[in-house]
Amino acid sequence: MRNQHYRKLTGWVVLASILMTGCSVSGPAFKPVDPIPEGKGVVYIYRQPGFAGGGVYGTVTANHTPITKIKNGGYFPYITNPGPVHFEVSTEATNEADVTVEAGKEKYLKTTVGMGFLVGHLKFSEVSPAIGKSEIGECKLLDPIEP
């Protein structure tokens, strides 16, 4: 009986470790887009490295077009024309954010993990450039989703 309890406990510890550490990004370190292309703006979508919910990742879309998969410790510079952009991030649920892009300017869209029914949910929040610049430095570049 005691041996069975030990195996069950060990299984839960291993599962929790996998879910909490998960995959992290191994791309190049953060580098700002400089210069921002003429007549364009950039939205940095990022997720700070963290222990909790590390294995949770989701697909990010911009105006319903998949652009990247956001992962623990990753960032993606979305360069686009000025105007409104509708972003979504999807796991078992979808979260949305609308960002107004301005020519020559940068915006920061932070992704955090909240708890869902079976897995964590990713949530967007637009943060000030001062906060975004201070938080994104530890992040690594994510690959784009090719059309």
Image (cartoon, grey):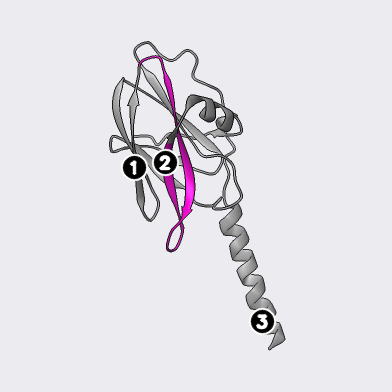
Task: Give how far across and how far down residue 63 sits, in percent.
Answer: 28, 34
Q: Amino acid at mark 2?
A: Phe
Residue 7 vertical position relative to residue 110 in the rendered view, above or below: below
- The segment highlighted magenta reads 103-125
Q: Which mark is residue 5?
A: 3
Locate the C terminus and report the quarter of the image it occupies.
top left
Q: CA distance from mark 2 to mark 3?
A: 40 Å
Report the label total.
3
Q: Nearer the viewer, residue 130 or 36?
A: 130
Q: Residue under circle 2?
A: 124
Residue 124 vertical position relative to residue 14 in the rendered view, above or below: above
Locate the N terminus and report the quarter of the image it occupies.
bottom right
Residues packed near mark 2 inside 10 Å, few (<14), some (14 to 19) or many (20 plus): many
Q: Amino acid at mark 3?
A: His
Residue 15 vertical position relative to residue 90 in the rendered view, above or below: below
Magenta span has 119?
yes
Task: Give how far across and how far down residue 102 sits, in percent.
Answer: 35, 19
Q: Nearer the viewer, residue 21 or 85?
A: 85
Based on the displayed image, in which of its 4 quarters is residue 3 positioned?
A: bottom right
